[in-house]
Image (tube, rainbow, N blue to C red):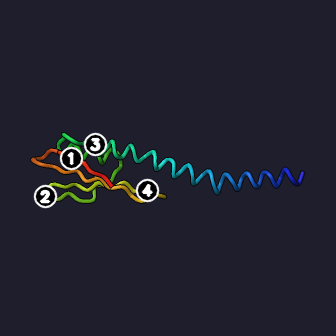
Amino acid sequence: MVTILKMHKILAAFFILILVPTSYIAAEFYDTSDFIEHCKSTIGLSVDSSKSIIEALGLTSLQTENDGIILIQQVNMLLSNRFCLLHHLDGNIVDATWK
């Protein structure tokens, strides 16, 4: 009976210490592809409609400058934050790069 109780504790510790953090990291890697697709999807749209899409997705627009760049940030819990630069010209997004 004691060995079964010890085995349950070991399995619980394994689940808490290994599987939970691994699932968070896997979710953030999966989220990377979504973030890149959201950046790409703004190409060709107007700046105003791009901003509304960014706000609807819960992403943070860090700065809008007159030099033609909008900096977008995705905050992550475990991995480093992601950034996307939307380059605009004449009110339309013409290019998107990400880090």
**Dot 4: within a 10 Å radius of its alpha carbon, few (fewer than 14), some, or many (20 or more) residues?**
few
Side of 22 relative to 39 (left or right): right
Residue ID for mark 4 = 76
Give whichever of discs 1 and 2 has the lower sequence position: 2
CA distance for labels 4 and 3: 20 Å
Give whichever of discs 4 and 2 has the lower sequence position: 2
CA distance for labels 3 and 2: 21 Å
Give whichever of discs 3 and 2 has the lower sequence position: 3
Residue ID for mark 3 = 40
Q: Residue furthest right?
A: 1
Where residue 42 appears, as percent x and y from the top left, is 24, 42
CA distance for labels 1 and 2: 16 Å
Residue 95's tag is: 1
| Residue type for callout 2 | Asn
| Residue type for callout 4 | Asn
Q: Residue at x 40, y 48 (%)?
A: 32
Q: Residue at x 70, y 56 (%)?
A: 13
Q: Residue at x 46, y 50 (%)?
A: 28
Side of 98 relative to 9 (left or right): left
**Dot 1: within a 10 Å radius of its alpha carbon, few (fewer than 14), some, or many (20 or more) residues?**
some
* Element marked by disc 3: helix
Where residue 83 appears, as percent x and y from the top left, is 32, 55
**Dot 2: within a 10 Å radius of its alpha carbon, few (fewer than 14), some, or many (20 or more) residues?**
few
The reply to whether the C-beta atoms of the residues labelled 4 and 3 are less than 8 Å apart is no
